[in-house]
Amino acid sequence: MTPGERIKRPVKIGRHIADARGNVALTFALTAPLLLAGAGAGVDASRFFAAKSALQQIADGAALSGARQYFLDSSNAIAVEGVATAAAEAALRSNVKDLEAAVSAKANAGAAGVQVTISATYRPTLLAGVFKEGFAISVDSFAEARGSEASTCIIGLDTSSRSAVFLNEAAKINGPDCAVYSNSTSNAGIEVLRDAKIISALTCSSGGYFGGAGNFSTQPLTDCPAREDPIANRTRPTVGACDYNRKQVDDFTGALNPGVYCGGLVVNGASDVTLNPGTYIFKDGAFSILRTSKVTGKNVGLYFTGRNANLYFQEQSNVSLSGPVSGPMAGVLIWQEEDPRSAKMFEVRSNNVHTLTGTIYLPNSTFYASVNAPVAQSSAYTAVVARKISLDGQVELVLNDNYSDTDVPVPAGVGRAGGDIVLRR
């Protein structure tokens, strides 16, 4: 070996690799809990914010449901709170099953609003051992009913069937100051097809609706509280013995009197009939106006009871009627007795139905109109409360609400109904 020559020693590579592996293993062992904790925290944080978002949506929906109640009864704060609470609790049961949640609703009658608060505890999944008490979640939503008042003009009473309110072809409901309600929980409780249209201040379905933006002047609201039947608890007219049996007049000009028309009444030919004031009871038979007959009457009530008791206006007939101002039928122009044997269709097929002032009440039947002209356009007001309302063809059902222009009273429950609902958080 020369001076300055370095001595080369063999390098033991295997030992260094083993040492490196040992260091990595030690480092991983020390940091693994932190890494797992971080991953768990990320998962739990994501679930926490998803749960909070779900609760916020439920609170918003419940507040909207409660605020709509002001349109039905503006002073009943208990009903507002009850509807909001029930809506929130139902949504929680259906959509958020893994949280312990409590609901509170507080009505503000002065603002026509309701605040819904949902409080819950989120319990972590991966870090349950670390955060044993969980994390509190609280969300709030406030909905306010405001805007111009509307009048209840249409109520479809059917609670489950499709198309409690149905329009087809170019049919139209024309009530710019009116509210149109469907009590059906079907996802198409209101159905508007083709070029048909509902023009209203408020359209409200207990379920859903079918139709495009062009079929409605205002976007329908859904999940609305069912509208109470405004006539159901009224005292019915008394049905006495028959005054007439299967009465028919042909090419008759003159007046007919109130009474019990057993087997119905047919006005035929080119008759020109005036109905004297009072209540006309059609028992087990229809009231039919046929061919070119004309029927007019002021302060008359048409009451239908028993089998086959319905109404039929033929194409060329001419009709102008206004309801009673007093007695059991005050404000109700047409009333069908609630009976499972009752007829299922009341048909307007005439192009000359100018005046139907009052409320049309058909709890068992469909109010059906298929004509090529406006219906009820000369009425001071018209309201239709029926199991179903069905319009077809070119018909335009005109729903005026000029209550001060007539002495025919407006039944309780046909009146102030709605406007806009504003959601604030």
Image (cartoon, helix red, strand yellow):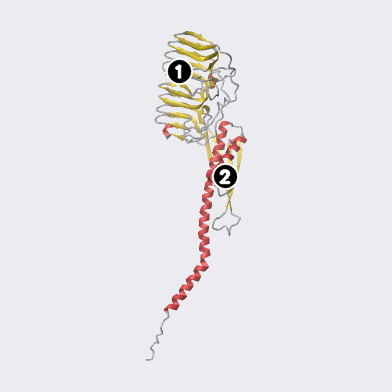
Find the residue positioned furthest to the top. 253
Residue 186: % across, % down: 49, 35
Displayed quadrant of residue 170: top left
User: Which labelled disc corresponds to residue 64?
Assistant: none
| Circle 2 SS class | strand
The residue under label 2 is 140
What's the residue at 48%, 11% (across, down)? 248
Residue 223 appears left or right of 197: right
What's the residue at 56%, 32% (across, down)? 71
| Screen quadrant of the N terminus | bottom left
Find the residue positioned furthest to the left. 2
Q: Earlier in the sequence, mark 2 or mark 1?
A: 2
The residue under label 1 is 313
Name the kind of residue labelled 1 in the image. Answer: Phe
What's the residue at 57%, 57% (across, down)? 128
Name the kind of residue labelled 2 in the image. Answer: Asp
Find the residue positioned furthest to the right. 78
Question: Which residue is at the front of the view, 56 or 286?
Answer: 286
Vertical side of 420 occupied by 340: above or below: above
Vertical side of 327 occupied by 104: above or below: below
Residue 136: % across, % down: 59, 51
Residue 382: % across, % down: 51, 22
Tell me, yes or no, if residue 425 can be seen here.
no
Tell me, yes or no, if residue 411 can be seen here.
yes
| Screen quadrant of the C terminus | top right
| Circle 1 SS class | strand
